[in-house]
Amino acid sequence: MQNLTLIHNATIINENRTFNASVLLEGEIIKKIFAPNEQVEIPENCTEIDASGLLLLPGIIDNHVHFREPGLTHKGDIRTESRAAVAGGITSFMEMPNTVPQTTTIELLEEKFALAAEKSFANYSFYMGATNENLAELKKINPQNVCGVKLFMGSSTGNMLVNDEKSLSAIFAESPVRIAVHCEDEAIIQQNTAHYKSLLGDEIPIEYHPKIRSAEACYKSSEKAIALAEKYDARLHILHLSTACEMDLFRNDIPLAEKRITAEVCVHHLWFSDQDYAHYGNKIKWNPAIKTAHDREMLIQSLNNNKIDLVGTDHAPHLWAEKEGSALKGFSGSPLVQHSLVAMLQMAKNGFFSLEKIVEKMCHAPADLFGIEKRGYIREGYFADLVLVNPKRVWTVTKENILYKCGWSPFEGTTFDNSVETTWVNGKKVFDKGIFDENVRGKRLIFRKN
């Protein structure tokens, strides 16, 4: 008989409902969900967990992380960052190709999958990186076991900018999988850089970062990506949106299942605004940049009204020494996977989102958008990827409880009113009240045919 676990009397948040019930796990699978008030018979040899007063959510699916392996493992690696992820309630991730070497061939892509099978605490997939020259490799992708193609239409960490017009058109016309795009217009960024260097010299203060990587640069690039997707009927997913003006480019009058063009917002663009640069400095330096309070307000509104389809992290660890310096010198990107869910739950407590909306955008929508097989929901027959949250345990982020290999967090010093208590990956308890099962390994994500 498979191992049995009964999560008893939890407050389940799933498919726009909140209700009290119990869930039986058998091996890797959710065996049964007991209806509210249904008599629960505890099977023999069953581990029972009293979840009274706790929230049970589907495991978070993060479609946008940088775990830095291979080649940049002084910052983070698949083991350390997936370990931090499951402590934050993330049970599946999709990782980006700007490693060393860059993941731009099928051979290099499969080498990453082999590393993850050996090291990852969570389920995993990896994007193939697009370049100006590798269309032939992109066309070899099997859509059932690779999450997508990553395309940089703005330069960022790793310098994988695709700027040849023929190459861009060919990628949109012929990619066999969804194209996930970083959108910032390079010409505008270079013009802005030259302008502020003429005024301020090379040591430009960090608060000018969103003026250099401006809303105009974001909008122009996103508009171009959407035009290409519409021209070639490509499946396009625009990553880490940061501006109010871009919201006019997206639809909320059709369901997610009918959308060919979809949108992501990251936790940091929902939490911070440019008013926070004075306090946090380079800790909140990302590409695209944190913009104004109005931009933040419109991103929150657009997530609630479904113009934005899902929430990711763009988890991107750097050593603090690499982050230091002026707006032109400090590296862009910060670690987030350990704190993304608790930050979103804090925003729910503060009235920005409902708990049901958080589960929709961090669990259901990533599974639906990418077509992930049997994950993202609490359903009988689905993989038991689950997270148990204590909504009343107050704690503060400190250096001592940060799990990222880089050893710091933009949330250091922040107090959260909720905590991740337990995380299951494929029915195995990988994290429980600060303790890890170091033997648990996730599975390669499988995708339905589009």
Image: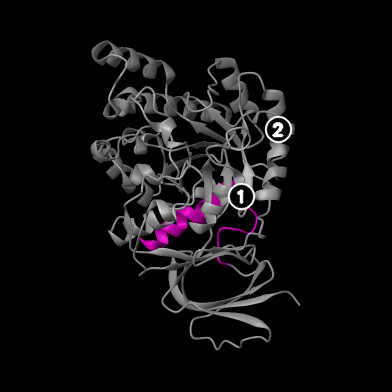
Instruction: Give the overall secondary structure of the magenta segment.
Output: helix
Whichever of labels 2 and 1 marks the residue nearer the N terminus, that label is 2
The kind of residue on which mark 1 rests is Gly
Image x and y of residue 183, in percent:
45, 29
Q: Is 244 placed left or right of 42 in the picture?
A: left
Residues in magenta, as a range: 354-378
- Check the picture and name the quadrant holding the N terminus: bottom right
- The one nearer the camera, 189 or 299, is 189
- The one nearer the camera, 138 or 251, is 138
Q: Is residue 368 something one can see in this rendering?
A: no
Task: Tell me the element at label 1.
Answer: loop
Is 374 inside the magenta-drawn segment? yes
Q: How crowded is mark 1: few (under 14 residues within 10 Å), some or many (20 or more)?
A: some
- Check the picture and name the quadrant holding the C terminus: top right
- The one nearer the camera, 5 or 351, is 5
Give residue 177's quadrant in the image.
Answer: top right
Q: Residues within 10 Å of mark 2 (few under 14, many from 20)?
A: some
Q: Is 18 placed left or right of 123 in the picture?
A: left
Q: Is 31 placed left or right of 90 in the picture?
A: right
Is 206 inside the magenta-drawn segment? no
The relative height of residue 1 versus residue 210 in the rendered view (above or below) is below
The relative height of residue 142 versus residue 197 in the rendered view (above or below) is below
Q: Is residue 72 something one can see in this rendering?
A: yes
Residue occupying the point 55% across, 66% down: 378
Image x and y of residue 148, in percent:
61, 38
The relative height of residue 390 versus residue 142 in the rendered view (above or below) is below
Give residue 140's quadrant in the image.
Answer: top right
Give me the disc on residue 108.
Answer: 2
Quickly name the residue at label 1: 371
Image x and y of residue 282, in percent:
34, 34
Task: Tell me the element at label 2.
Answer: helix
